[in-house]
Amino acid sequence: METINYLLKSATIIDPKSIFNGKKRDVLIKGDKIHDIKKRISINEPYIEIKSKDLHICPGFIDLHTRIYEPGMEFKEDFKSGLDAARQGGFTGIVHMPGTTPPIQNSSDITFILNKNEKNIIDVYPTGCLTKNMDGKEITEIYDMKKNGAVAFTDDKKSIENAMLMQIAIEYTKQFNTTIMSTSYDYNMCNDGQLNEGKKSTMLGLKGIPSIAEEIRIARDIDLTEYSEGKLHISTVSTKKSLNLINKAKKKGIKITCDIAAHQLILSDDMINDFDTNFKIFPPARDKKTIKELIKQIQNGTIDIICSDHSPVEIEKKKCSFNNADFGIIALETTFPICNSVLNNHVSIEKIVELLSVNPRKILNIPHPKIELNKIANITIFDPTEEWVYLEKNIKSKSKNSPFINKKFIGKIIGIINKGAINLNN
């Protein structure tokens, strides 16, 4: 098969681990490797040129929380539609959540995920359930799944109620340096809750989800991690007090990391009007003060990662009453645009790349793909200054549950390069 050459013209390289970080260069890709990086490249062979007004490249984004409901619930999202959405969003890798039907909870399940997607341009990193059937009662065969390629273990949105079981899991996983990811909340305190507990929930007559439900569980999980001398990654943190607890734990030397979802930077509970179920998400959109706090905690390094928290929901579960609607938002295609639009006046583009690309790999022990000569090309291509509108007709996901349809963003994904292949967005 003939090798196709790709010439990225006058690209600003954003890669903190590269000697070319912050420099504008021509970059030539041949096959699956970076063949040349110079101020100006001339090539006599046939090539495809990629250019933009403000072309940027970085190590490919990895999403830490992607829900693709294959096997079992492909009507929400299957691998084809989910990975198409990931490509469109600039991700070269996704971390696959285990809440399928049946759930991903043994080594053969992990092998199925890997084999199914081996030839796709997107790297799919499977996670396994932390407890059997995600019911919080018995730990799964973690070591066998780890040996077969699982990168982390999680019951996804289901918090572990049993403190002893959680402590044993943290103790056990530290023996082979793997990661537990936990969405920490006390279910008993937010049972039947629909949105953030506050003025808006009172005004709409809907049961609220209080901040303390998250905060007391995060406090417990930090204490368990310290006691076990293990490590823990806390997912989609949503309150100021939670982040302060994590910040203090980090300063104390406890091995805690955390993420937020991109939409937490832009959605607040006061936006929930006319009972629009596209705003029904978990954790719930908090108030505007919390958004300011999230930005502050990104700046000070408390927040390690921004993810999509991609959660497709079929139309029947959104076109209904708010009480009966499912939680969730599709987000792979809007993660970078939200980050860039909201954060561009607060942090550098290098920081955004760190949150979307560098830190997910660091936490999951995945090698960093440097943008340097003779390295494997695993690259996200974007223009941080281009304005565009997110249209429903262009959504690649099977589900359309997004509050951002028809919204204008600053910062557009141009394409990705990975595994010797390229995908350029229209």
Image (spheres, grey):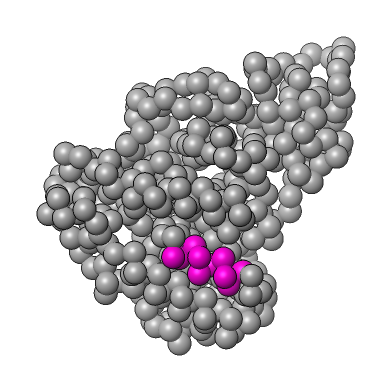
**Residue 214 lies in quadrant:** bottom left
Image coords of residue 26 (percent x, y): 80, 22
**Residue 53 lies in quadrant:** top right
Q: Nearer the viewer, residue 313 or 405?
A: 405
Q: Is residue 196 above or below residue 387?
A: below
Q: Residue at x 12, y 54 (%)?
A: 205
Q: Nearer the viewer, residue 200 or 96?
A: 200
Q: Residue at x 39, y 63 (%)?
A: 157
Q: Which residues are magenta?
A: 241-250
Q: Would residue 2 be counted in the magenta stretch?
A: no
**Residue 399 lies in quadrant:** top left
Q: Nearer the viewer, residue 123 or 163?
A: 163
Q: Would residue 245 be counted in the magenta stretch?
A: yes
Q: Is residue 330 left or right of residue 200?
A: right
If the image is split into quadrants, where does the N terminus sit?
Answer: top right
Image coords of residue 175 (percent x, y): 66, 80
